[in-house]
Amino acid sequence: MSKYNSVKVEVDGLKFDSKLEAKYYEQLKWLEANKQILFFRIQPCYMLQEAFEKNGKKYRRIDYKADFEIHKLDGTIEVVDVKGVETEAFKIKKKLFEKKYPHKLSLITYSKIDGGWIELDQLKKHRKARRKVSV
C-alpha cells in the first residue's frame, strides 16, 4: 500500500500503480476499440531537463513518466496522469513539461457524482460550487 492508499493492480499482464489507473486503462482500450481515439501508449517517458555539470558536480537528467499518452483523432496528443490528488512533485514536473512540450498534460480522476472521468481542476471547481449551494 502506498502513502496515498493506492493498491498495485495487474491487468492484461501490465502492472498499474492503482486501481484507478487500471480502470482508466480499461476506458482507453474501449475508446480505441470504438475508434474514438487513434491509439494510446502506457507510461511514456519525457525528458524535462538534460543532465549537466556545475562546479565539478554532475547532475542527472530529470525525466517525467506519465501514466498514458493518448493520440486523438484530430492529431493532437494528450498526456494523462491518473491521480486522486495533485502532489507537489507533479506540480513542478507539470511546469517543466508545459515549457518543453506542446502536448496537453491532464491530471484526471474519477468522480461518480460528477459523471465519471474528470480533470482534477474541474473536480475542485465542482466541489466548491456544491459547498456554496449547501451553505
Image (cartoon, helix red, strand yellow):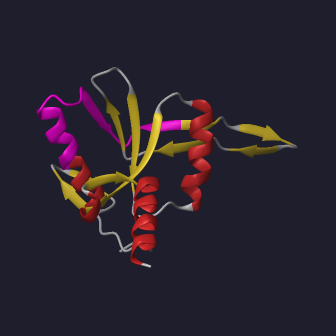
Magenta-drawn stretch contains 39: yes
Residue with the most extreme left position: 34
Going by the image, does 22 lie left or right of 133? left
Between 115 and 20, the one nearer to me in the picture: 115
Place of residue 93 in the rendered image (x, y in percent of width and height, measured from the top left): 58, 47
Between 37 and 100, the one nearer to me in the picture: 37
Q: Quadrant of the rendered structure where residue 47 is? A: top right
Place of residue 108 in the rendered image (x, y in percent of width and height, measured from the top left): 38, 52
Place of residue 107 in the rendered image (x, y in percent of width and height, measured from the top left): 43, 50
Place of residue 132 in the rendered image (x, y in percent of width and height, measured from the top left): 46, 71
Q: Give the answer, above or below, for where 86 lies relative to 46.
A: below
Q: Tell me what residue is drawn at x 58 percent, y 37 percent.
A: 98
Q: Quadrant of the rendered structure where residue 17 is? A: bottom left
Going by the image, does 89 lie left or right of 23? right
Magenta-drawn stretch contains 17: no
Quadrant housing the C terminus: bottom left
Q: Quadrant of the rendered structure where residue 56 is? A: top right
Quadrant housing the N terminus: bottom left
Between 67 and 37, the one nearer to me in the picture: 37
Q: Give the answer, above or below, for where 129 lies relative to 74.
A: below
Find the magenta span and give its range: 26-46
